[in-house]
Image (cartoon, grey):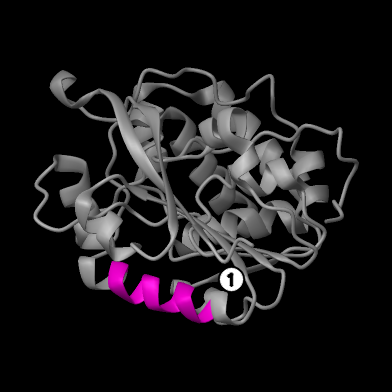
Amino acid sequence: MQSIIESNTTILPFLKWAGGKRWLVKYSAELIPDFSGKYLEPFLGSGAIFFHLKPKAALLSDKNHQLIETYKAIQSDWRPVLAKLKEHHRKHSKEYYYSVRKSSPRKTHTKAAKFIYLNRTCWNGLYRVNLQGDFNVPVGSKKNVILDTDDFEAISESISGVDFQSGDFEQVLRKAGPDDFVFVDPPYTVKHNHNGFIKYNETLFSWSDQVRLRKSIDLAVARGAKILVSNADHPSIQDLYGDYEQISLDRLNVLSGKAEFRGRYAERLIKCGYS
């Protein structure tokens, strides 16, 4: 696999995302297989795996249109995005947060800066919308909009050759071929589970979607793709992927609003099409 930029250049995700995979990169990167084809990701989020691998050819997708448009804005020209983000940094306050949250910017770079600003200053970086599709997460405790780790120039360079699209995961998996690598990290839903966060995910990604995802993965594996799936460590998921090698890993969950739901939670990693 060839990287688009020097392999010793560290690029950190610029977004905080529920279920983000920085922990996987840090502690279990050996689960990622060698591959000579392209990299595909149908549930992009913060892109931790992509930024770790820095592949030369990639197709990155997510159903969240605003997320993908933010990446594309940085890909096209990161400078006005950063300039607007610095303005948000100077003006940030609780009142300013809510004024930006209800605003409707029209320009590409101002929409991207709004998305990043809300992500960095809302409660725990959670992305959630109401029935009208409006972002409705309250302001959080974070004050810094500009981070010491920001390098939007390097991020823009790393995604310069990436094909971005927004839509259903099947559109991406259909394009996976011989020796491509696909990282699949859907919203975690399971059968008969009433945990608050997973219950919320059910509205985004139903159990029938989980079954449809498994079928799409099977087809991609049959074409020679290698796929790593991250999912809930639950009997229904274990049964759904019963034909594949599975590993249980612990991660720290800090997103729950209730203390009793915080702590270490296991995730199921499933290796599909590995030789």
Is residue 19 shown left or right of residue 138? right
Q: Quadrant of residue 127?
A: top left
Is residue 262 shown left or right of residue 227? left
Q: Compared to 63, does 1 lie above or below? A: above
* Residue that appears at 58% across and 71% down: 165
Label 1 sits on a secondary structure element that is: strand
* Residue that appears at 17% across and 19% down: 259
In this rendered view, identify the residue nearer to me: 149 or 188.
Answer: 188
Q: Amino acid at mark 1?
A: Gln
Is residue 216 highlighted in magenta? Answer: yes
Q: Quadrant of residue 189?
A: bottom left
Is residue 80 highlighted in magenta? Answer: no
Image coordinates for residue 211, horizontal then vertical, percent: 29, 72
Image coordinates for residue 253, horizontal then vertical, percent: 33, 28
Image coordinates for residue 3, horizontal then vertical, percent: 85, 51
Which secondary structure type mostly characterizes the magenta part of the structure?
Answer: helix
In this rendered view, identify the residue nearer to me: 261 or 28.
Answer: 28
Q: Can you say which quadrant of the picture contains the C terminus?
A: bottom right
Magenta part of the chain: 210-220
Q: Compared to 175, does 230 lie above or below? A: above
* Residue that appears at 47% across and 72% down: 217
Is residue 22 shown left or right of residue 51? left
Q: Quadrant of residue 177?
A: bottom right
From the image, tell me which residue sits under label 1: 165
Mark yes or no: residue 130 visible.
no
In this rendered view, identify the residue nearer to me: 271 or 95.
Answer: 271
Image coordinates for residue 246, horizontal then vertical, percent: 42, 50
Mark yes or no: residue 241 visible.
yes
* Residue that appears at 88% across and 46% down: 5
Q: Compared to 2, does 215 lie above or below? A: below
Dot 1 crowding, Cα within 10 Å, few <14, some 14–19, many 20+: some
